Amino acid sequence: MSVNASVLPLDGNARAVIEGLTSQQKWLPPRLFYDRAGSALFERITELPEYYLTATEQAIFEREAADMVRSAGDCPTIVELGAGTAKKTMMVLRAAAEKSSAITFIPIDVSSSALKVARRRVNRELPQAAVHPLVMDYTERFPDLSRFAGPRLALYIGSSIGNFEPMEAAALLRRLRLSLRRGDALLLGTDMRKPASLLIPAYDDAEGVTAQFNLNVLARINREFAAGFELDRFAHRVVWNESESRIEMHLESLRPQRVHIGALDLAVDFAAGERIHTENSYKFTPKMIEALALNAGFRIQQTWRDDRNWFRVTLLRA
Ligand code: AVI
């Protein structure tokens, strides 16, 4: 039996592709980056010499994890939003395991393959920790954490909060706070504002991995929605938006073209030079972190940073 796709209810990604590509200023949501291919490309980005974020945050954790756990207080349950493969988290888990004999780790991510790696890693390196991975999109809903012992320590690291508009970021942290109890803690990683000469290469690396990561969004739409994007007709573009304090990623159409998206019954026209805005990555100042904490109803307790002041990890109290 053949089914007309147009009568089936559309999922969130389908709706976003239609909405984004029929807008005056075309856009696509950054969550579309993270299919299996995109998650693997992101792992490669984190190892690039230009992408200083991961190594810098990792160095802060290596030096300060024990102090962070001490300041957070006794937290037998550790919840991580967007945990991925939980590589950086190990340092916090090890420090927490030294304090409490029984710890529970709840990594949350949309990628089940990344969570499998995370679970194997924790089981191997810290067999005494109980691991409860949750495959879910935390931007849509929050898990019920009440069945896990408190107090809880939430982790939101890697500057993932920077991929949200300031209002959305505050709303997300507010929802997180509501799923925590008074006195629970949050460790928040934020990439700090710095000269464009350092920021641009981090998002436009010499090897072209970030370009592939950006273009993979079109490849994914081809795969999942029977679209006809020809990847060599689009180019990866990176802009430092000084007034908004953010790096922007775009895909620029290199010629006038029409692209059909079969499963959505949609034809999209592009002018030469027209761009699809695919990501914002906000770069923070201490004031921006304070405003975010305040708007989300958290109190800042302590901050750790690297020697160059490129990245910060802030302990917030619900
Ligand atoms: C996941 N997130 C914090 C990354 C960032 O730096 O904004 C995503 C990314 N985009 C391009 N490179 C990395």
Image (cartoon, rainbow, N blue to C red):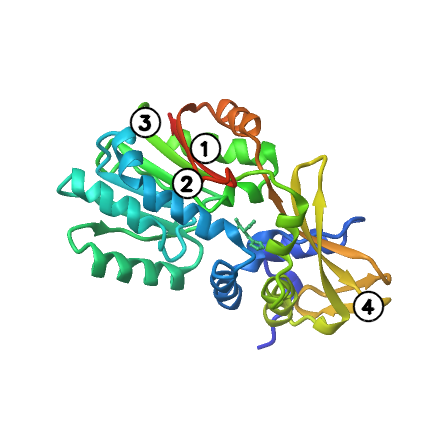
**Mark 2 residue type:** Phe
Q: CA distance from mark 2 to mark 4?
A: 39 Å
Mark 1 vs 4, N-terminal side: 1
Mark 4 vs 3, N-terminal side: 3
Label 4 crowd bin: few (<14), some (14–19), many (20+), radius 10 Å: few
Q: CA distance from mark 3 to mark 1?
A: 12 Å
Judging by the rendered image, the residue that carries numbered circle 3 is 181
Q: Is mark 1 within 8 Å of ligand 1?
A: no
- Kindly tell me whether residue 279 is visible in this rendering: no
Quarter-of-image position of residue 233: bottom right
- What residue lies at 44% left-to-right and 52% top-to-bottom? 55
Judging by the rendered image, the residue that carries numbered circle 2 is 142
- Kindly tell me whether residue 138 is visible in this rendering: yes
Q: Secondary structure at mark 3?
A: loop
Q: CA distance from mark 4 to mark 3?
A: 51 Å
- Residue 175: which disc? 1
Q: Observer-nearest residue: 287 or 27?
A: 287
Query: Given contact means CB atoms under 8 Å apart, are the residues at marks 1 and 4 in contact?
Result: no
**Mark 3 residue type:** Arg
Q: CA distance from mark 3 to mark 2?
A: 14 Å
Residue 46 in percent (x, y) is at 48, 58
Mark 1 vs 2, N-terminal side: 2
Judging by the rendered image, the residue that carries numbered circle 4 is 258
Q: Is residue 8 left or right of residue 135?
A: right
Query: Given contact means CB atoms under 8 Å apart, are the residues at marks 1 and 2 in contact?
Result: yes
Residue 252 in percent (x, y) is at 77, 60
Mark 2 vs 4, N-terminal side: 2
Residue 306 in percent (x, y) is at 44, 40
Q: CA distance from mark 1 to mark 2?
A: 7 Å
